[in-house]
Amino acid sequence: MPLALAARGKTGADVEAFVRRARGAARRAGRQIGLDDVLAEIRQGRIAMSPEARRRSAIHEAGHAIVGRSLGCGALVDLSIHDGGGQAQFEYPVDGAATLPKLEATLATVLAGRAAEQIEFGGVSICSGFGPGSDLAQATALAHDIDLQFGLGKLGPYYVDPAERHLFLAGGLVDTAVDRLRGAYARARAVLETQTTALRAITLELAEVGYLSAQDIDRIMLDHPATASPAGTPVPALEMGAA
C-alpha cells in the first residue's frame, strides 16, 4: 500500500522502471530488494509529508467524505494520502439530470475540506485554493455556472456565452457567487460540527494507513453517529451506499 500510494498516477511502465532501478541499487549494495528501495525510486528525492502536514491533509479529506456522504452527494470512491497531499475521489453527479439542490450539495462537499480544517485547527491552509484544479477553483466555477450557464440563479432561465461571462461578473454576479459559496461553506461546517467524533476517527485511520475505501468510511461513520445539531439546525439524513 505505501508503494501504491506513492506511485498513484504513474503508469505500468513507470512502475517497471522503479522496480528495475531499485533491484539494481539493492544488487550493488549486496542485498535483496526491499520496500524502501522501491519507495526511494518512486519518490526520486521527494521528501515524505511531515506528521503535522499528514494530519492536516487527513482532516481535510475526511471533511469531504463526511459531508459528501451526509448529503448524498455523488459516489465516494476512496480517500488517500500521498507525498503530494491528499485526495478524496468522488464521482460527482454534475450532469444533465442535476438539480439546484444537488449542485448546492456538491458545493458544500467541495468546500468541506476547508471547513474541517477550520473546525479542527481554528484556521485553514492554502491547499484549498492552490491552483486551477483546487477546491476553491472548482467551487467558484460551479457557483458561476449555476447563474451563467445552468439558468438556476439570479438571472433565471438565461444562458451567458462563455466569451461574455466577464461582463456579467463585473456587473455584480461576483457578489452573488460569493454569497452562494459562503452559504455552502456554512452548510458544510454545520454538518461537520455534528460529526466531530467521526471526523477525528476517519482522520486517525487515514493518517495511519494512507488509504480508506468508501466501505471503510461508512463503517467509521456508522460507529460514530452524528450528535444533535446545534441551534436546532436539522441534521441531514445520512445516505449510505456502495460507491
Image: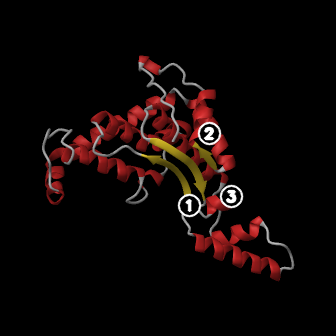
Q: State the SS at label 3.
A: helix
Can see residue 44? Answer: no
The residue singled out by tag 3 in the image is 2
Asked if 8 appears above or below 208 in the picture, the reply is below
Q: Which residue is drawn at 69% across and 47% down?
A: 208
Q: From the viewer's perspective, is 112 left or right of 3?
A: left
Pointer 2 with pointer 3, Cβ within 8 A: no
Alpha carbons under labels 2 and 3: distance apart = 18 Å
Alpha carbons under labels 1 and 3: distance apart = 13 Å
- The image quadrant that residue 162 belongs to is bottom left
Residue 216 shows which numbered tag?
2
Q: Residue at x 59, y 39 (%)?
A: 215
Q: State the SS at label 2.
A: helix
Residue 92 in the image, given as x and y percentages of width and height:
40, 45
10 Å neighbourhood of mark 3: few (<14), some, or many (≥20)?
some
Asked if 199 appears above or below 7 in the picture, the reply is above
The residue singled out by tag 1 in the image is 84
Q: State the SS at label 1.
A: loop
Residue 17 in the image, given as x and y percentages of width and height:
64, 77
